[in-house]
Image: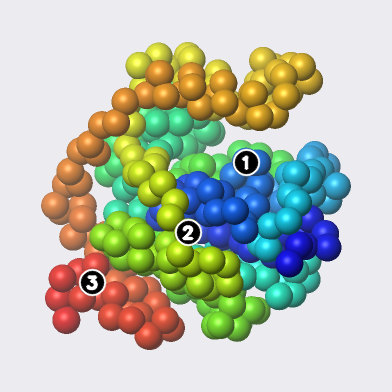
Amino acid sequence: MAKSSHKPDTFIVGAPKCGTTAMYEYLRQHPEIYMSRRKELNFFCRDLRPESYRGDLVDPQAYLTNFSECSVEKRVGEASVWYLYSRTAARDIKAFSPDANVIIMLRNPVDMVYSLYSHYIWLRHPTPLGVTDVRSQRVLSFEQALASQDERRRSFLDSFPWDQVALAGRRLGNVFHTDVAMYTDQVKRYIDRFGASRVLIIIFDDFKSDTADVYRRTLQFLSVDPAYHADLRVINSNKRIWNAKLHKLVNERDSKVKKLARLVVPDRLRMRMRRFVRSMNEQDKPRPSMNPQTRQSLEARFRPDVEKLSRLIDRDLISLWYGVP
């Protein structure tokens, strides 16, 4: 049955570094699912932007153009990992699409924050008081980033005359703070708004160990053909960069070159060119092992929240992620 409109009804809402890019790419392959042309639209992250912002990210018509090529697909979706962290996205998505299906992907919070830190290093995106500081160009070690996170957050908020509530979200996320991996309250917002039957929670360990089975269960959740076989190759592994300047040019969303390209190069061709350049400039590289003392400290920090999350979703995550009953 074709959709009568191009409004999305399926949302992968997070968390960051928990397999959302892979799931987005796998769902895009299904003939009964239309996923937005690009990931991370962040339209519903209104609390994570200054109130004065008036760009495309808050323009409903601009948002819906991301689904304009949808035709006969049964499901229309997008993936924006900061919807989970946002305090208002669940409410706004519910108002926009009351019967939406929500997919939440979660990972051991210790591994998640280490992967997120590595992602910020890989981005080479300087952020005031972030892991790569725009002022000093200093790159913090993981331990330095953890030790200074509260001080850097306070300094960041004190340094800018913007709406402090907005700064406490996505932009501050680029500064890096472990709050993003305190999952329980974030997950509860979606269960409370949509009901448990419309929220699919995927644990990264399951996704990694049996990707095909998790993909099949996701298709069943979305009421599309679960027998479809997608190309389930590994996506978004840890990378090393050959040319930092080229990497920055390709990944900076608002660079002058990108703005010009949007005017003269069709979307599909531009995205293929971007993927090609990135593939030539990146190489898979195993992430260095975390310092055992750092891991132990983070496990202690996250354990109370993991215990609450276990009760919320009725699964023993302490045994899974900590290796102890």
Q: Amino acid at mark 1?
A: Arg
Q: Which residue is mark 2?
A: 228
220 left or right of 285 in image: right
Q: Position of residue 210 (x, y in %)?
A: 29, 62
Q: Quadrant of residue 251?
A: top right
313 left or right of 166 in image: left
Q: Nearer the viewer, residue 250 or 99?
A: 99
Q: Position of residue 113 (x, y in %)?
A: 36, 52
Numbered disc in front, either 2 or 1: 2
3 left or right of 276 in image: right
Q: Nearer the viewer, residue 180 or 318?
A: 318
User: Are the residues tagged 3 and 2 within 8 Å (C-beta)?
Assistant: no
Q: Secondary structure at mark 1?
A: loop
Q: Quadrant of residue 258?
A: top right
Q: Position of residue 236 (x, y in %)?
A: 39, 40
Q: Which mark, residue 176?
A: none
Q: Amino acid at mark 3?
A: Leu
Q: Secondary structure at mark 2?
A: loop
Q: Would you say residue 22 is visible in this rendering? A: yes
Q: CA distance from mark 3 to mark 2?
A: 30 Å
Give me the residue at 33% from left, 31% from top: 239
Position above or below: 139 against 197: above
Q: Which mark, residue 320?
A: 3
Q: Quadrant of residue 307?
A: bottom left
Q: Name the N-terminal-most of marks 2 and 1.
A: 1
Q: Which residue is mark 1?
A: 38
Give me the residue at 76% from left, 62% from top: 2
Characterize the local packing of mark 1: few (<14), some (14-19) or many (20 or more) Cα atoms within 10 angstroms. some
Q: CA distance from mark 2 to mark 1?
A: 22 Å
Give me the residue at 55% from left, 54% from top: 30
